[in-house]
Image (cartoon, rainbow, N blue to C red):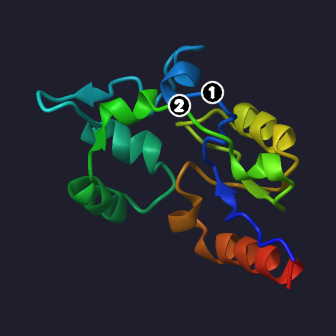
Amino acid sequence: MTAPQFPYISGFALDAGESIGALLAQGAPTPALAHLRIDEQGFAWLPQDDFVQHFAADVDPIEANVMYAVQQPLPAAALEEVMGTPAWKNDVPTWYAVAQNDEVIPPDVERLFAKRIGATTSELVSGHVGMISHPDEVAGLIETAAQSVT
């Protein structure tokens, strides 16, 4: 039996040849990414206000500030990495949780990703980090995905 692909939780579902940077360049920056800063070492950081108010918008502000304080930078070069053949192209069962209030990836774009990859889709009334603000719902999605292929 084919193992499921881990569910996408408000994430980029890239196709072969795509990069996150190229997709982001197709539209205006979202509120969470509008002030993304690249430091002298080539790492991308979100400013505190954007992190707390947009990236982790529906997380308790104290917890969101802790998340901000311990965030690990993303090498900016990762934004230009091109996707090889994604697992979903190989008829791997896939799930996608759309975050209805996401300010990183527009929810309509998430819905397009989910449709394109043929995912079983659910919607969370959450921001980008639904796994933090709605852990029980996300855990339920993961459990459903795992149980559906056993």
Q: What residue type is labelled 1?
A: Gly
Amino acid type at mark 2: Val
Out of 109 and 101, give the one closest to the viewer: 109
Classify 96 as above or below 150: above
Q: Nearer the viewer, residue 72 or 28?
A: 72
Q: Which residue is drawn at 58% across and 23% down?
A: 23
Label 2 and label 1: CA atoms lie apart by 5 Å
> Which quadrant, please, contains the C terminus?
bottom right
Upstream in the sequence, badge 2 or badge 1? Answer: 1
Left or right: where 84 falls relative to 80: right
- Give the SS element for disc 2: loop
Left or right: 43, with 144 as reference point:
left
Q: Name the residue at 74% across, 80% down.
A: 143
The circle drawn on residue 50 is: none
Of 87 and 114, which appears nearest the observer?
87
Q: Where is residue 74 in the image (x, y as percent from the top left)?
A: 32, 42
- Image location of residue 25, percent across then percent down: 52, 15
Q: Is residue 94 visible?
A: yes
Residue at position x 79%, y 39% from top? 111
| Label 1 SS | loop
User: Does residue 22 sit above or below 106 in this rendering?
Assistant: above
Residue on which the image places disc 2: 82
Q: Name the residue under label 1.
A: 17
Disc 1 crowd, CA 10 A, few/some/many (<14, 14-19, 20+): few
Q: Where is residue 80 in the image (x, y as percent from the top left)?
A: 44, 27
User: As drawn, is 83 to the left or to the right of 85?
Assistant: left
- Where's residue 86, x and y in %? 68, 46
- Is the N terminus in the top left, top right, bottom left or bottom right quadrant? bottom right
Asked whether the beta carbons under mark 2 and mark 1 sit within 8 Å of each other, the answer is yes
Looking at the image, which is closer to me, 130 or 62?
130
Q: Bin the neighbour count of mark 2 within 10 Å (Cα to Cα): few under 14, some 14-19, many 20 and up.
A: some
* Count of numbered circles in the view: 2
